[in-house]
Amino acid sequence: MVHAGSMINTLLLSIATFVYVGSMFFYLFGLVFKKKFLDAAGFAVFVGAFLIETAGLIARWVESYHLQYGHIPITNLYESLIFLSWTIALTYIIVDLRYKIRKLGFPISLAAFVFMAYASFSPSVSSRIEPLVPALKSNWLIFHVVTSFFGYGAFAMAFGASIFYLISDWYTKHTNGKVLSYLPSVRVLDDISYKLIIVGEVLLAIGIVTGAAWADYAWGRYWSWDPKETWSLITFLIYVVYIHLRYSWGWHGRAAAIFAIVGFLFVLFTYLGVNLVLSGLHSYGST
């Protein structure tokens, strides 16, 4: 028998998935027709999708207590995909309120939709709420996963800003200095990407440290060179190189944007690739 709460949380999350699509089209039309009211509509719909997704996550959390499992919905691949979408959306909303970069809403709403759709429609991803495996029964779970995923969200935003940097930079160079007036200046995009990478790196560092503490609690050792641990460290070091080049050599511009894009590919592999391709102590995340 399916609990009514289960149907409510999956319904809300499914609705949010398609509302993100609506937001994406508003942003796309805003890019094509260069109309600010379409961007404003896209942002309003995006916030609506975020609020519906938030309600879905809360409903799922409440449902876990009804089933007497009582855990935050970030413990399997389905929930982590939804939560990643949520953290990216929240990060975008915060950045948009600060910088008014509505054009970034298109790739961000697309990313939110892709993660939500993969969680909802992939036959390999189960949406069932299940009891925690012993390794996950720790208070470190929330600190480790939440900080890591907000770090991922910051890196995703830096990725989007860097994509737009390259588009704007290419356009300027091939139109004799003419700029894309409906995008922020390349200086602003470069600065946003850099600041987001700093935030993401700090959060990822906290995620790695809390993960080590969690590993000691669960498995009796802080570090075991598990594939997820190893790739998290590799990703962290890649962004360390970015920050070092920025501070020491004044590195910025096109090369920095490309580096930020490549860095996010490592983030994606650390999050999804390791779980789906490699096996290890974190393999429960793919089931």
Image (spheres, grey):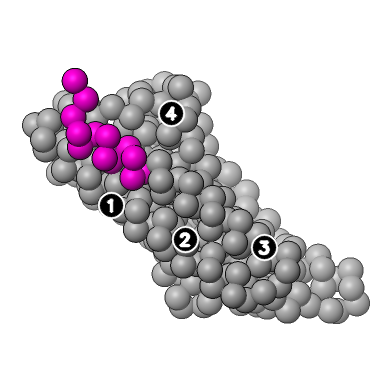
Q: Earlier in the sequence, mark 2 or mark 3?
A: 3
Q: Earlier in the sequence, mark 2 or mark 4?
A: 2
Q: Residue at x 18, y 29 (%)?
A: 3
The residue under label 1 is which amino acid type? Ala
Q: Which residue is mark 1?
A: 55
CA gap between label 2 and label 1 equals 14 Å
User: Regarding mark 1 in the picture, which secondary structure is present there?
Assistant: helix
The residue under label 2 is which amino acid type? Phe
CA gap between label 1 and label 4 equals 27 Å
Q: Which residue is mark 3?
A: 29
CA gap between label 3 and label 1 equals 28 Å
Query: Which circle marks residue 275 in the picture?
Result: 4
Q: Which residues, given as a range, are shown in magenta?
A: 1-13
Q: Which residue is mark 2?
A: 46
Taking 141 as reference, is 153 left or right? right
Circle 2 residues within 10 Å: few <14, some 14–19, many ≥20: many
Q: Earlier in the sequence, mark 2 or mark 1?
A: 2
The answer to whether residue 71 is seen in the rendering is no
The residue under label 4 is which amino acid type? Asn
Taking 87 as reference, is 262 left or right? right
Residue 268: x, y in percent?
52, 41
User: Regarding mark 4 in the picture, which secondary structure is present there?
Assistant: helix
Q: Do the numbered discs 2 and 4 sit on residues whose CB atoms are within 8 Å?
A: no
